Amino acid sequence: NAGVTQTPKFQVLKTGQSMTLQCAQDMNHNSMYWYRQDPGMGLRLIYYSASEGTTDKGEVPNGYNVSRLNKREFSLRLESAAPSQTSVYFCASSEMSRRVDGYTFGSGTRLTVV
Amino acid sequence: TQLLEQSPQFLSIQEGENLTVYCNSSSVFSSLQWYRQEPGEGPVLLVTVVTGGEVKKLKRLTFQFGDARKDSSLHITAAQPGDTGLYLCAGAMDSSYKLIFGSGTRLLVRP
């Protein structure tokens, strides 16, 4: 099925460890996004990529880096995980020329940092 | 500070009842979307509204965009247990199409 695929679905890290969250979309969308979701706070934008080759900071970028590897893939890296980064992470994609279609989200990565 | 405020945060109602969820801001949005999210899944788009005063209907769901494009509401008629979930509003403020999400309304419809 067409959509956004995120891996892994679950991860437990120790404080200070690093990891990369993977995201791939097969809808030929130009724009991709990383959000984190915490209880009572909705979704907050970490980084986004308006098009292949560009990345920009969102609302909460500290502690994260991203790579837009190609048009399909957009990864999120935690260099030194902290307990405050315990959250559910969602990747999304969209086609900017068709705003009414909205975002397509992956099913999320649940990350726990101990 | 949340740019988009949703109310109520939680709502527990009996099957067959009506309800309204509100999404308010002091900022103007070029478009506003409503998503529904079920446990363990990502949000799924329900509707996009782009014109001030616009009303859209999706079966038992009615969405309205405020005249000044600062607020929106979602009304559900005769709620069913299948409507249970987290409802999120999201607004786009500029041409970059970054979406700003509200904090969500968690709806439980009891059989």
Image: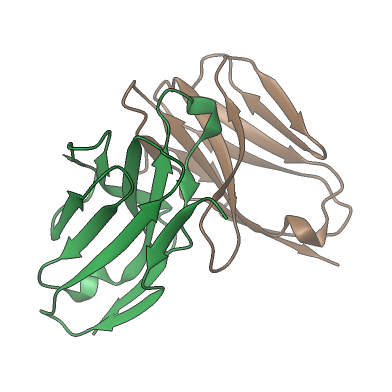
Chain colours: A green, B brown
Q: Quadrant of residue B109?
A: bottom right
Residue B1 shows in this picture: no
All told, the count of numbered labels is 0
Specify whether A114 is left or right of B46.
left
* The quadrant where residue A13 appears: bottom left
A65 on left or right of B5: left
Pinpoint residue A4: horizontal percent, then vertical percent: 45, 54
The quarter of the image holding the C terminus of chain B is bottom right
Residue at horizontal 42 percent and vertical 32 percent from the top: A95
Query: Where does the N terminus of chain B fall, quadrant-wise?
Result: top left
Answer above or below: position of B34 versus A16: above
The spot of residue A3 in percent (x, y) is: 50, 51
- Residue A7 point in image, percent of width and height: 36, 68
- Give the residue at x 76% y 30%: B57
Residue A20 or residue B72, whichever sits in front? A20
Asked whether the viewer can see residue A49, the reply is yes
- Quadrant in the picture for residue A100: top right
Q: Is residue A34 left or right of residue A17?
A: right
- Foreground pick, A22 / B66: A22
Q: Residue at x 43, y 60 (%)?
A: A5
Q: Position of residue A85 (x, y in %)?
A: 24, 68
Q: Residue at x 30, y 62 (%)?
A: A22
